[in-house]
Amino acid sequence: MTVRGHSHLEMLVDQLEIDTEIIPFSLPDPLDVRLDVDVTYRLFDLQKLVRFYGQRYWEEETSEFGKVPGRLELENVAAHTFNVARCVLLLAPHFPWLDRAKSVELALVHDEPEIVTGDRDPVGKDGQGNDTHAFNQALRRDKDCEERRALDALAATMRHSLRSPYLNIFDELIEASSEEAQFVKALDKLQALVFVRLRKGGRITPDHAAFTIRYSRIGVHRFPPLQEHFKIVLRDLLNDVAQSRPAEALSFYDEVFAKLESADQP
């Protein structure tokens, strides 16, 4: 990669940086962050494993499966939930003021409203999330209301002693009223970024990259001490582009910048 290309890459990575002088906090050691991110990548290998595949008594299900084990497919919500919760255990020790058990609890349930609502598309028709809950505040409020209705329906099926605590957990998540909730919401976005890097890599389009950077910013602003983790994953993703199509990398970065500037216009 040229010096200019490297500079453009780092300028894109810096889109996920918050000035520590404005919001003072300590960042984890860079070497530890690199190790954390590599472990996060490795955890996705679990999604490539298919239980019972090819085993005796499971021949019919194996033939119906249709996928090839060993490849990272589109993930289901349960797999995403596991990765968010697992990353609480991996990353929370950097931040000793967090209640780790509470964070795990929040992570394990954070997407349960989707049992009722389904997984809402954050990208939308314009490819940048401007017409979805991702960046439209009115639609964000609508989504929160829909989730509260879903939670009421889910809670109604539980034994009475669990209902109020269950709804209280989600009040905390939806309102992001604790640092643990902010942390889990940030991890939710970090996991999305990791999945994009592992599944798309050098095949990502400039449109998708621009949306991914903007969407990841939400996570960084939720919990700024995680910014270096976000930045390393984004750097890895952009390096994937440079390695897979070196002749196009500079124009790719320029196009992403242009799309970011356009999307960020008020």
Image (cartoon, helix red, strand yellow):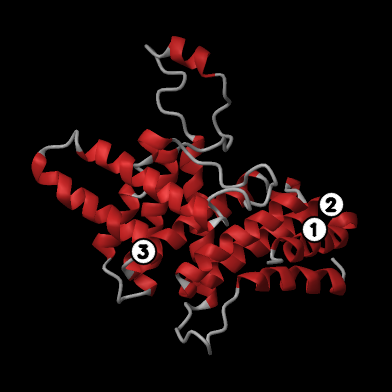
Q: Is residue 191 visible?
A: no
Q: Residue furthest front?
A: 138
Of label 2 and label 3, which has the lower sequence position? 3
Is residue 86 toward the left or the right of residue 28 in the image? left
Residue at position x 36%, y 34% in the image: 116
* Left or right position of 135 against 207: left
Q: Amino acid at mark 3?
A: Ala
Q: Circle 1 is placed at which residue position?
A: 242
Residue sitting nearer the eye, 107 or 115: 115
Query: Which residue is drawn at the image coordinates 48% and 53% (left, top)?
Result: 140
Q: Write the residue at 67% across / 45% down.
A: 200
Quarter-wise, where is residue 187 in the image? bottom left
Which is nearer the eye, 241 or 135?
Answer: 135
Residue occupied by mark 2: 245
The percent position of residue 234, horizontal first and vertical second, equals 64, 62
Query: Closest to the observer: 77 or 172?
Result: 172
- How far apart, in angstroms, are the residues tagged by discs 2 and 1? 6 Å
Query: Residue 220, position in %: x, y?
Result: 52, 68
Q: CA distance from mark 2 to mark 3?
A: 40 Å
Distance from label 3 to label 1 (Cα)?
37 Å
Q: Is residue 49 above or below residue 96?
A: above
Q: Residues within 10 Å of mark 3 (few under 14, many from 20)?
A: some
Identified by mark 2, the residue type is Arg
Residue occupied by mark 3: 176
